Amino acid sequence: MRIAFRQPDVDRRHSRRRGPWTLAANRAFARRLARAVAGLVLSATAAQPVAAEEGEGGEKPAVSSWYTQTVARGDSGLTVTYLWSLKSKLRAETVARGHKLVTIVNGDTYYVYDGITMTGIAIRRAPAALAADAPNRRPFGNEAQILIEQGGEKIRQETIAGMRAEVYQITDESGRRVVWVTQDDRRLPIRLELFDRKSGSTRYKEYIDWASGLPVTDAFFEPEPGIQLDRFEIQEFIENALANNNAAMLPILYPELLHGPSPP
């Protein structure tokens, strides 16, 4: 199944990035980049894995691989992310301010590294995160299911990008979250809108493309040769982050895949 959208103001070409960037050499820029990415990926609603949908009687086999592209925008600017999964494995390439941050979740390890400097970190995942892994779960694109679990309700149906969609919304003390999803058993997200009551700002995320059943292999979910990785146990990483050490300069975009699902 494939859903494609086009956004005229998004340049999909991969251009050469300019300028060196190292964690030690430019901590101020690293902080700005981390804030920009963390503010736009909407990871609070996107990270928690949810079981893949199945037809009645289990006659439909679980889809083992997925791909999608997202464009997130808000006050901090524009972020483009490409996501692949194979069963519970994840690879995400996020472009923000000209830098490509690669996140890989594979088995007991959470990797994040800078595709320009070829440096990054590898963190051993928490037992709760490992326990949430399952072959029939995709690690992204579950916003509608999570919203419903949090108490969200269907508010209307409408046509978006030429397709019929269901719209779900939840409003609470933190603000308002709205998700548009396809009207089929996959319930794939099409658009997200998040209003933050405290700041008064609204962020958006569009899913540009969906594809399933791609012939990706396990090797695709390994860091490229030559990546220099500092390795941490999860508690060691947390301590470094709290101490504002270099490890904290690389944003964790999918925290529930590192720490485990948040309690309801």
Image (cartoon, rainbow, N blue to C red):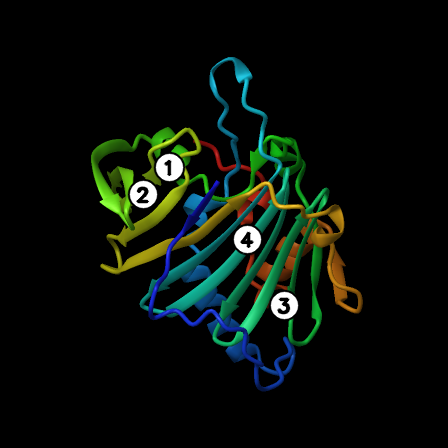
Whether residue 53 is situated above or below residue 189 in the rendered picture: above
Q: Secondary structure at mark 4?
A: strand
**Marks 2/4: CA–CA distance:** 19 Å
Q: Taking 94 as reference, is 177 left or right?
A: left
Amino acid tagged 3: Asn
The answer to whether 263 is drawn above or below residue 231 in the figure is above
Q: Are marks 3 and 4 in contact (CB under 8 Å)?
A: no
Q: Report, in whole angstroms, how far the alpha carbon at label 3 lies from the one at label 4.
A: 28 Å
Residues 74 and 161: in front is 161
* Crowd around label 2: few <14 · some 14–19 · many ≥20 (10 Å): many
* Position above or below: 236 against 163: below
**Which residue is under mark 2?**
179
State the mark number for residue 221: none
Q: Which sits in the foreground, 46 or 199?
A: 46
- Residue sitting at the far bottom: 19
Would you name the residue on which mark 3 appears? 245
Identify the residue at horizontal 72%, vertical 42% (top origin).
Answer: 107
Is the C-beta separation of discs 2 and 1 under 8 Å? yes
Q: Quadrant of residue 26?
A: bottom right
Q: Earlier in the sequence, mark 1 or mark 4?
A: 4
The dot on residue 144 is: 1
Query: Which residue is denoted by mark 4 in the rendering?
Result: 83
